[in-house]
């Protein structure tokens, strides 16, 4: 068979130029091989052991022996893959139990599981609103929410982070011009660790017949007794659209919407990422079911991550967090990368987050705490950070 020699193409030239520009700004991203184990230990590219304080596995459930066993049992019983989309033959029996548990935890009538949190957001929003409608979104909402909003073709208005008064101003000026209105926020903002003012927003949404939606990716399993941000804020019943992920505190994979039965049935009928995506592997669903059981019944488990975060922040002279996330803004990309590298040299994995994930000039280390972190590892991290001059006290 004749082989065709390919000359350098304009496509490669374009990609190389873009990569070089990102490299010059310290914004190029590269994959590293990370072999994770229990107690948040990991080996990066075959190197020495590091303790990760950058993971989203807030409860350590991805390596919990009972969760791993449940995943294996599901795979043995139902196979390695789902075989098709859920509306074809991929709706294996474990889905029913998973959605029932999610609805119970979130305090809703039903829940609908998607292939991932990203797929959930790019499916939910365009299913509910279109070009004649209005979306009011916090300026710091996650990227996948931006994608869902663009697909909806609705009018989008952003408000300054957590400024309820500004939301009121938008509703007062524009509500009458649009058929349907959604207010979209993150329950917990992943780069700062703060919680959305859901009670105030929920009451405001009810006054204007708007629908409040929160992305609870970083809240399920960590706050509100494990039930998430609406329960942490006393906003039960005020957030009719509770979206989230199964890949963080739950330790598995997938996304969901917890809502009323008519809304979840609409998702199963019209949300494109649900209709046209193969169902989750049975192992992922089995693991999630077991993880949710632990979240529901182990109070000490769900309170430990925030307790450890508060211990760290107090020792470092940083503001007291309400979630397991403690941000430390460094400034430039280069300085944040150097701080991350210095911590790696003494045994800790803490990622430097850079633009466009965070605004220009606010590159940071984001420390995230897990129930599986050992007390002595937290103390070692505090000592290392102080020695490096990080935080509010040196």
Image (tube, rainbow, N blue to C red):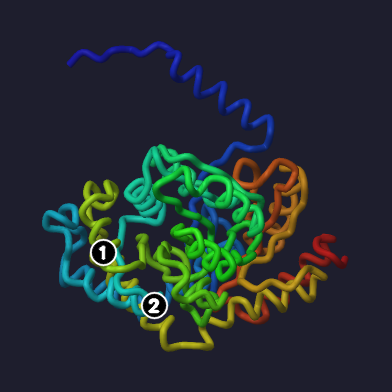
Residue drawn at point x = 40 percent, y = 11 percent:
7
Residue 127 picture location, percent across and down = 32, 49
Q: Nearer the viewer, mark 2 or mark 1?
A: 1
Q: Is residue 113 left or right of residue 377?
A: left
Residue 6 picture location, percent across and down = 36, 13
Residue 103's quadrant in the figure?
Answer: bottom left
User: Circle 1 is placed at which residue position?
Assistant: 262
User: Circle 2 is placed at which residue position?
Assistant: 107
What is the secondary structure assignment of the residue under circle 2? loop
Whether residue 101 is visible: yes
What is the secondary structure assignment of the residue under circle 1? helix
**Residue that protrudes farthest toward the front in the picture:** 176
**Residue that protrudes farthest toward the left in the picture:** 89
Residue 335 picture location, percent across and down = 77, 46
Q: Is residue 44 left or right of residue 385?
A: left
Whether residue 334 is visible: no
Mark found first going from the N terminus, 2 or 1: 2
Establish if 342 lies above or below 334. Answer: below
Establish if 147 lies above or below 54. Answer: above
Establish if 126 lies above or below 215. Answer: above
Residue 318's quadrant in the figure?
Answer: bottom right
Quadrant location of the N terminus?
top left
Residue drawn at point x = 26 percent, y = 52 percent:
274
Please state which of residues 234 and 7 is positioned toward the viewer in this rendering: 234
Please state which of residues 380 and 296 is positioned toward the viewer in this rendering: 296
Q: Mark 2 and mark 1: span between their CA atoms?
A: 15 Å
Residue drawn at point x = 54 percent, y = 70 percent:
40
Q: Is residue 109 left or right of residue 245?
A: left
């Amino acid at each position: 068979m004749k082989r065709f020699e390919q000359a350098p193409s304009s496509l490669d030239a374009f990609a190389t130029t873009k990569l070089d520009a990102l490299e010059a700004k310290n914004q190029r991203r590269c994959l590293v091989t990370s072999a994770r184990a229990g107690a948040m230990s990991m080996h990066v590219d075959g190197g020495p052991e590091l303790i990760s304080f950058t993971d989203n596995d807030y409860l350590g459930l991805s390596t919990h022996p009972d969760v791993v066993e449940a995943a294996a049992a599901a795979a043995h019983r139902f196979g390695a893959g789902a075989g098709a989309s859920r509306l074809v033959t991929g709706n294996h029996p474990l889905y029913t139990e998973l959605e029932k548990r999610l609805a119970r935890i979130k305090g809703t009538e039903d829940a609908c599981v998607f292939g991932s949190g990203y797929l959930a957001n790019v499916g939910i929003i365009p299913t509910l609103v279109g070009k004649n409608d209005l979306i009011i979104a916090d300026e710091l909402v996650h990227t996948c929410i931006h994608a869902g909003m663009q697909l909806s073709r609705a009018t989008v208005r952003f408000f300054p982070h957590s400024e309820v008064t500004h939301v009121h101003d938008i509703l007062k000026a524009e509500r009458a011009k649009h058929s349907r209105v959604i207010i979209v926020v993150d329950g917990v903002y992943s780069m700062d660790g703060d919680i959305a003012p859901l009670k105030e927003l929920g009451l405001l949404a009810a006054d204007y017949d708007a629908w409040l939606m929160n992305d609870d990716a970083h809240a399920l399993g960590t706050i509100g007794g494990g039930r998430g941000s609406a329960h942490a804020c006393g906003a039960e019943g005020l957030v009719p659209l509770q979206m989230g992920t199964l890949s963080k505190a739950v330790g598995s994979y997938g996304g969901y919407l917890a809502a009323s039965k008519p809304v979840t049935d609409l998702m199963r009928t019209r949300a494109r990422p649900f209709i046209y995506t193969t169902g989750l592997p049975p192992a992922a669903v089995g693991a999630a079911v077991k993880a949710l059981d632990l979240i529901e019944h182990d109070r000490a488990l769900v309170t430990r991550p925030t307790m450890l975060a508060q211990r760290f922040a107090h020792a470092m002279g940083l503001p007291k967090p309400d979630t397991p996330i403690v941000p430390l803004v460094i400034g430039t990309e280069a300085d944040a990368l150097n701080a991350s590298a210095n911590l790696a040299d003494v045994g800790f994995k803490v990622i430097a987050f850079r633009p466009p994930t965070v605004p220009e000039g606010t590159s940071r280390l984001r420390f995230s705490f897990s129930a599986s972190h050992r007390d002595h590892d937290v103390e070692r991290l505090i000592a290392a950070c102080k020695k490096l001059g990080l935080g509010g006290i040196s």
